[in-house]
Every structure is written in structure tokens, then in C-alpha cells.
Image (tube, helix red, strand yellow):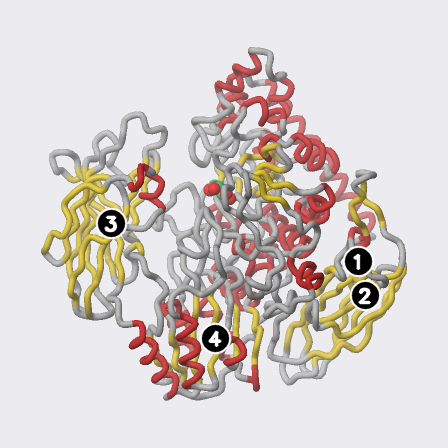
């Protein structure tokens, strides 16, 4: 069979399946009355839409997203594989790796009964201060689109839907529910809509999520122009549109604006309110039908509508999640500095320091949180990889000033009792956080009978000294440690905002002298008193703990002494949950606590100092020229420490290239995230990221695209035929490696309205030492286009360009003219 014939048959098969799906959708729609339709669109609870057995529709289940699948329970008792953060995935510059991540996530979703993954996040790194920077891919729309398309293709190949989010221009967190982002059409088209458009074209996502924010005066959940006219009309998006959680504010506005499902339920602008709007003549029933069709089509695709053929009849082969998490992590690490071949490590002793070396920060905060069943810290990874007796560890500096949910060292279980003290049921408690939502209660327990929860067990300290215990949550608590009751009272809302009691800092309630290795009994009793009218019953509280606090100078001195006595020093520095999370933006890019002092002291004691940066987004590294090597590891996922050992020992090279410019805040050209009078104006136009750094003539710490491996590459030739580009290169180092060949397009005559150059293509290639390799890339038409605001259309800019191939935006190795 010829290739064309095969493609033809496939296309025919696809068209047939789609016709069958549409027929099933119409039949199902015909079986619903107005109330059922309105109820379907309003959501049943936090994560699901109602089942409609009369038409064979199962309840559609949704879950975050994007680095794992949490499922409908927000608890460590229901663990998930945790992959590296989205920025890390983008740092591998490999859509195929993103596709494989997606296949694993679909497998996780199916395991947890989830039909719709609330991911990927394809907003752009507009300002380094953006609190959810770690959750987005890049500052470059083309790279974002390619990684996002790979991810969506992977997830959907496993029969699970994606919702590409947050549509659109949701690039910061400050006042995110109300901010009006003012962005010109050209800037929307060329930057903020571009990844969505590319993903729709390449991967046909089955969903999008519309954002909290407003764009140019219209709420995104009501944005008829961007949703109905552009995404559906121009791009041909045929999936469903779900609101971000609680983002829908108006019944008629949302339904007219193309919003299909308003989540969560049961309190919703849809449901009864929507049925009423139709009956009152404010909304045409046909508009509701269009939304229901989109939801039913989604159900058909994921196999939740009886009689419709699922989009994926045959599932991909099973994936080993831990192995993939480790592979993605090492492929994502970016080696930004490596003087005198400091890495890989030579044989000898290693002094490891940093709080995050022992308690790694493997994922970012907020809705992206999942609970892995284990975490490999740098200390765990290096202990396993290095010969016995060659590794020492000191804390050095601990930026965590807050109590954390009880974890390491605690063995706990939850005992549920009724008002008479009778045991109703028990549950394992993998951490000190108890969170039971809705009917998700331990066997034998109901909200009507539950009176107290005793979280009890033992704690074995790893350090001697004064340990602090605390409580997060509202209501009556009794805290007992080692036989003494330290707190027996009620915790009330802080500042009348119950939200702060759940997500704010825990209250310290006990200070106890303990000895390393000697277990003590701990118990936290909570008396449950949920108001009867609560729409969703949630039992949530946490036992929290902090290690003994030692004198910061003494900690640094101890680390420096250990470093001075070792052949190599490895310092792990990190951000904390109070620095990088959904819900707020950053105000500076500094490493918290005394970590900069720690690096300087260690580097002064040992010239062979390697710094590992465990941060989801850019941080300032003011000592970067004083250390031998700097390795950026993002939020590396559950296997981060194992991957770190792979890379430090040289078992694998670090594969990452910067998907975003890293520089000091004072030099960063675009930083503003705080709206003025409710508005955030994207006044920088198309100049964000490297486009802005170049225009400002400023030099960042590390440029876009930069990243070293363990071998060297020589770019030998660049051949351009039409818009097809061939680059020949050679591995001139002494070990096998992978190179990311980056192609930048620069107008031959500078044009102040356009960036000096932009990423127009890339390809990864591997070669053995001395071996030649070749990549062929066809430049997309869009690389030559600008959005013409007057014409309201794309305009192909003819003329002369220079094509530049190289290792980063500044390390351009070879060029060729190109005229179009
Ligand atoms: C976030 C979304 C997330 C949703 C559900 C929102 O606050 O912005 O990204 O999918 O919550 O958890």
C-alpha cells in the first residue's frame, strides 16, 4: 500500500467514526428535556458533571493537572505519579517526550476514573514574577505550542480529554478573578493566543478551560469573540469549553459567550438559572443545545456515552511512571555553567548541603499539587549512587520558616468516632493532613455520625532539640505529644477569612524537647462541627511540625567546614511554597533565607562547588560566577534526586535548554503583574522574554535556549531550500550526546515593530563522539507572518531574512540568507 493510500483509508475511517459520534450525540440530545440539559452544564459537585442514565451518559470526571492526576480526592491517601513541572518538560525541547508524558498521564487518569485532565497550562512567561510561572512552559509561543501539542496528543491517545488552559492571557495571579488584561489584537494573535491556535491545529484538543480574567473588557468565560468567533470559528475547535473553577459569573453572558460547562457544581450560573433564562426568553434553547452537544461529544470521545464509539478503541502500552519521571527530570535539567569540567563529578568525597537536598521541593503549589507515594531527594539519590563513606550531609541553611504538614518520621492513622466515643472507622494517614470531601469518608463513617477524628501515632525525630508542633484548620482541637497535652481549645478564623485557615500558615501550639531516634506518641483530636447548610461537606485539618531551629551562622559554618574537607561541594538551593504557588505573584526573585550566604561560604571553602537550583521559575544567582557549576533542576518531580544523581555522576548528561530567559529582576524588561485600577496593560506589545531583553540591549544571566551537555558540538553547514532547512553538525567531544539545534529567523533589515529575531524551529539530534548528525526542519509559514490589525488578518512579510542556527539565542553558530 502506498503512503497516500494508507492516509486516505485512515481519513475515511476517521470521517466515518466522526459521523457515528455526531449521530450518537444528536440522538442523546434528543432524549433530554430543558431541565436535564441545564443541569448537565452546571456540574454536579467539585469535579464531576451529573450522569444522565436516561441517555446512557456516565458522570464525566475531571481532575488537575498538569504534572500528575490528583483524582477526585485531594489527599495523600490517594497517591499519583508526580512528573517534573511543566517548565521542566518544556526545557527538554522535545514534543515527543511531552507526548510520552501525556500517555502516562492518561494511564493515571484511567486508573483514577478521570475522563478529563485539567491541563496543559499554556499561558506565557510574560513576567518572571508570575506566581504560576512554574506551571507554564515558556516565554516563547512557538515552543509552548509544540510542547503543548505533544502533551495533548499523548493524553488523548490514551482516550482521556485535555482542557488547554487558561484561555487566554492569564499570565499572572494578582487579582486574577477580576483583572482586566488590556492586550492589542496583534499581541493576542502573535503571543497569547498562538499556543492555543497551534495546539488546536496540531492536536485537536477535546477541551479548553476559559480563564478567570477579563480580556479587553470582556470576561473570558463570556468571550464570544475569542471563543466562538476565533477558537471555534476560525480555528475549527470542536471540543468543550469549561470555566475555570468558579470563573463563570453570568448565566446569559456565559452561554452566549460559548461556555459549555460552568464548574464546579452544584451552585452554578447554569442548572436551574439557565433553564429559567430559556423559559424567560433571555436565552434561546438552541444556544443551550449547542453547549450540550459539545459536552456529549466530549463524553462520546472518552467513552462515557453509550452507543457512541470512543475516540480511542485501543489503549497504548503501559508506561512505567517512575522510570519516565526520572527520564524527563534528567532531560530537563539545564547546566548553565560548568567551569573546568567540574561536572560530571570525579571520584572522591562529596559534601552535600542545603535543606532542599534532604527535603526536596518536587512540585509547585496550588491546583497543580498531587501526592506522590514516594519522593527521591538529592540526599537519597546521591546516597544510592555514590560509594559508601564518600558523602556527607549538612543542612547549611533552611529557608522554611513555617511549620509543614507532618510527614517524614511520622506514622499516623485516623480513628473516627461518634458522639459516644464509639469507633466508626479508621483510615491510614500517610501525612498529617486529613481531608475528606463529600462522600469520601473512611468505611463505616457518615457525616451524620462523625463527631471526632483522632489522628494518632508516633514520631521519630531525626534531630535532637526543640521540635515545634502546630495545627492547621478551624474548630476544636486537642494536641498531645509524648503524654503532655499542649493545646485543648478552639481555632477560629483569622481575619474573618476562613480561606486563610485552610491555605494560610499553621498555628504553632507546642514546643517539645526530643531526642534523635527516640519515638514519641503524638495525637491530634479534632471535633467535627460542619454547618448543616454547607454545599459540600469537607473535613479538613492538619497536624504540622517543624524541626529544631539552629543558629543560622552556625549552620553555614558547619556546611563550610564540611565543604572544605571534601573534594567537591554540592549545594542545593530552593524556593519554598510561600514563594512559588498559584494564588499570588512574587515580589522579588531572591532565594529565601540565608541561602545566598550559604553558597558564598561554601564556594569560599571549596573552589569545586556545584550549585543545584531547585526552583520552578527564575531566581537570582548573585554568586553565579564564583562557583564551578550551576545546574537548574526546576521542580523535578518525585524521582528528582535519582535523576540528579544520574546527571552529577555522569551516567547521563543534563539534557535541558532554557525555555525562558533567566536574569536579575532589576534588568528584566517586563515585570509588571499588579493591575492599576483593575487593569493590567500589556504595553510591551510583542516584546516579552528574549524579544524584550534584546530590544533593551540588556544581558541576562543566562539567555533563552542556553544549556550545556557533557560533549561539544561543531555546526558544519546550513542549507536552506525554500523554507526547508538542513543543519549538519558534529559531536566533537568525547562522549555520546544530544543537541537541540535552534533556528532563529531575523529580518535582514531591522524593523522596530518586530523583534530582532525569533524562534522559528528546532530539532533534537543525538550522535556518538566524532559522529556527524543532520537535522531537517521546515519553517512554519507563521514564522514569516505578522497580524495586520487594520486588515484583521495574517500578513506574510516578504523579503530577506537571515536564518541563524545555534545553541541559544546568543550562541548562534552558522547563518544563511533566506528570501521569501
Ligand atoms: C485553577 C485551575 C484548576 C482549577 C481546578 C483553579 O483555581 O486556576 O488551573 O484547574 O482551579 O482545581
Q: Nearer the viewer, residue 16 or 549?
A: 549
Give the secondary structure at mark 4.
strand
Q: Position of residue 309 (x, y in %)?
A: 62, 35
Q: Compute the Cα span from label 3 to label 2.
A: 59 Å
Q: Earlier in the sequence, mark 3 or mark 1?
A: 3
In the rendered image, the quadrant that contains the C terminus is bottom right
Q: Compute the Cα span from label 4 to label 1.
A: 37 Å
The residue carrying mark 3 is 471
The residue carrying mark 1 is 779
Q: Earlier in the sequence, mark 3 or mark 2?
A: 3
Give the secondary structure at mark 1.
loop
Q: Compute the Cα span from label 3 to label 1.
A: 56 Å
Q: Earlier in the sequence, mark 2 or mark 1?
A: 1
Give the secondary structure at mark 3.
strand
Is label 2 in contact with label 1 (beta carbons under 8 Å)? yes
Crowding around mark 3 (Cα neighbors within 10 Å: few <14, some 14 to 19, many 20+) is: many
The vertical placement of 655 against 41, above or below, is below
Is label 4 in contact with label 1 (beta carbons under 8 Å)? no
Crowding around mark 2 (Cα neighbors within 10 Å: few <14, some 14 to 19, many 20+) is: many
- Picture residue at 23% right of the left edge, 33% below the top: 529
Amino acid at each position: 500500500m502506498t503512503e497516500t493510500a494508507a492516509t486516505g483509508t485512515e481519513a475515511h475511517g476517521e470521517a466515518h467514526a466522526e459521523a457515528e459520534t455526531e449521530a450518537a450525540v444528536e440522538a442523546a440530545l434528543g432524549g433530554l428535556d430543558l431541565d436535564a440539559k441545564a443541569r448537565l452544564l452546571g456540574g454536579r459537585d467539585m469535579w464531576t458533571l451529573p450522569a444522565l442514565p436516561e441517555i446512557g451518559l456516565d458522570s464525566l470526571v475531571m481532575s488537575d493537572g498538569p504534572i500528575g492526576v490528583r483524582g477526585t480526592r485531594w489527599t495523600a491517601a490517594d497517591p499519583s505519579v508526580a512528573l517534573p513541572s511543566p517548565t521542566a518538560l518544556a526545557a527538554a525541547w522535545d514534543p515527543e517526550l511531552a507526548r510520552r508524558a501525556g500517555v502516562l498521564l492518561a494511564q493515571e487518569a484511567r486508573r483514577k476514573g478521570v475522563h478529563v485532565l485539567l491541563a496543559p497550562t499554556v499561558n506565557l512567561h510574560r513576567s518572571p514574577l508570575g506566581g504560576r510561572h512554574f506551571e507554564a512552559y515558556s516565554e516563547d509561543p512557538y515552543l509552548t505550542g509544540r510542547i503543548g501539542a505533544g502533551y495533548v496528543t499523548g493524553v488523548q491517545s490514551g482516550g482521556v480529554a485535555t482542557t488547554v488552559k487558561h484561555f487566554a492571557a492569564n499570565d499572572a495571579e494578582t487579582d486574577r478573578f477580576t483583572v482586566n488584561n488590556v492586550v492589542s489584537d496583534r499581541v493576542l494573535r502573535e503571543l497569547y493566543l498562538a499556543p492555543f491556535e497551534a495546539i488546536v491545529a496540531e492536536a485537536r484538543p477535546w477541551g479548553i478551560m476559559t480563564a478567570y480574567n477579563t480580556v479587553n473588557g470582556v470576561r473570558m468565560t463570556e468571550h464570544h469573540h475569542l471563543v466562538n468567533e476565533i477558537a471555534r470559528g476560525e480555528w475549527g475547535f470542536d471540543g468543550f469549553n469549561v470555566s475555570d473553577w468558579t470563573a463563570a459569573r453570568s448565566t446569559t453572558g456565559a452561554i452566549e459567550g460559548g461556555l459549555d460547562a460552568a464548574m464546579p457544581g452544584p451552585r452554578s450560573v447554569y442548572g436551574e438559572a439557565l433553564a429559567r433564562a430559556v423559559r424567560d426568553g433571555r436565552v434561546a434553547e438552541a444556544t443551550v443545545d449547542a453547549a450540550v452537544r459539545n459536552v456529549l461529544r466530549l463524553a462520546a470521545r472518552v467513552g462515557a456515552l453509550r452507543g457512541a464509539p470512543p475516540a480511542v478503541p485501543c489503549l497504548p502500552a503501559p508506561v512505567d511512571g517512575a522510570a519516565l519521571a526520572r527520564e524527563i527530570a534528567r532531560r530537563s535539567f539545564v547546566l548553565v555553567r560548568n567551569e573546568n569540567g567540574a561536572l560530571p563529578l570525579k571520584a572522591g568525597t562529596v559534601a552535600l548541603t542545603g535543606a532542599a537536598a534532604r527535603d526536596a521541593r518536587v512540585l509547585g503549589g496550588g491546583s497543580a499539587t498531587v501526592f506522590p507515594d514516594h519522593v527521591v531527594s538529592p540526599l537519597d539519590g546521591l546516597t544510592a549512587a555514590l560509594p559508601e563513606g564518600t558523602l556527607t550531609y549538612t543542612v547549611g541553611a533552611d529557608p522554611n520558616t513555617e511549620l509543614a504538614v507532618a510527614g517524614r518520621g511520622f506514622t499516623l492513622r485516623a480513628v473516627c468516632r461518634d458522639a459516644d466515643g464509639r469507633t466508626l472507622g479508621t483510615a491510614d494517614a500517610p501525612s498529617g493532613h486529613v481531608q475528606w470531601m463529600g462522600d469520601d469518608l473512611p468505611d463505616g463513617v457518615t457525616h451524620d455520625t462523625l463527631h471526632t477524628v483522632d489522628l494518632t501515632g508516633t514520631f521519630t525525630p531525626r534531630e535532637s532539640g526543640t521540635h515545634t508542633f502546630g495545627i492547621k484548620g478551624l474548630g476544636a482541637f486537642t494536641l498531645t505529644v509524648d503524654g503532655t497535652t499542649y493545646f485543648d481549645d478552639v481555632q477560629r478564623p483569622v481575619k474573618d477569612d476562613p480561606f486563610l485557615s485552610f491555605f494560610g500558615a499553621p498555628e504553632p501550639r507546642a514546643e517539645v524537647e526530643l531526642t534523635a531516634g527516640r519515638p514519641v506518641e503524638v495525637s491530634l483530636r479534632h471535633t467535627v462541627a460542619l454547618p448543616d447548610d454547607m454545599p459540600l461537606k469537607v473535613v479538613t485539618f492538619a497536624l504540622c511540625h517543624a524541626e529544631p531551629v539552629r543558629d543560622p551562622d552556625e549552620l553555614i559554618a558547619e556546611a563550610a567546614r564540611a565543604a572544605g574537607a571534601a573534594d567537591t561541594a554540592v549545594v542545593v538551593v530552593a524556593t519554598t511554597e510561600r514563594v512559588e504557588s498559584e494564588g499570588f505573584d512574587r515580589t522579588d526573585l531572591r532565594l529565601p533565607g540565608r541561602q545566598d550566604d550559604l553558597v558564598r561560604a561554601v564556594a569560599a571553602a571549596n573552589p569545586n562547588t556545584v550549585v543545584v537550583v531547585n526552583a520552578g521559575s527564575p531566581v537570582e544567582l548573585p554568586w553565579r560566577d564564583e562557583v564551578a557549576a550551576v545546574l537548574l533542576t526546576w521542580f523535578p518531580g518525585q524521582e528528582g534526586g535519582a535523576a540528579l544523581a544520574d546527571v552529577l555522576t555522569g551516567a547521563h548528561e543534563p539534557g535541558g535548554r532554557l525555555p525562558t530567559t533567566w536574569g536579575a529582576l532589576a534588568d528584566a524588561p517586563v515585570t509588571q503583574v499588579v493591575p492599576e485600577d483593575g487593569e493590567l496593560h500589556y504595553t510591551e506589545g510583542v516584546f516579552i522574554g528574549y524579544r524584550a531583553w534584546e530590544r533593551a540591549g540588556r544581558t541576562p544571566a543566562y539567555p533563552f535556549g542556553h544549556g550545556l551537555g557533557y560533549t561539544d558540538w561543531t555546526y558544519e553547514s546550513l542549507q536552506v531550500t525554500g523554507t526547508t532547512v538542513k543543519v549538519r553538525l558534529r559531536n566533537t567531544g568525547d562522549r555520546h550526546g544530544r543537541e537541540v539545534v535552534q533556528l532563529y529567523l531575523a529580518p535582514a533589515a531591522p524593523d522596530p515593530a518586530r523583534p530582532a529575531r525569533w524562534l522559528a524551529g528546532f530539532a533534537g539530534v543525538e550522535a556518538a563522539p566524532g559522529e556527524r548528525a543532520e537535522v531537517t526542519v521546515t519553517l512554519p509559514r507563521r514564522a514569516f507572518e505578522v497580524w495586520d490589525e487594520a486588515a484583521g488578518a495574517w500578513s506574510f512579510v516578504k523579503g530577506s531574512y537571515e536564518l541563524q542556527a545555534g545553541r541559544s539565542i546568543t550562541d548562534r553558530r552558522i547563518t544563511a540568507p533566506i528570501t521569501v
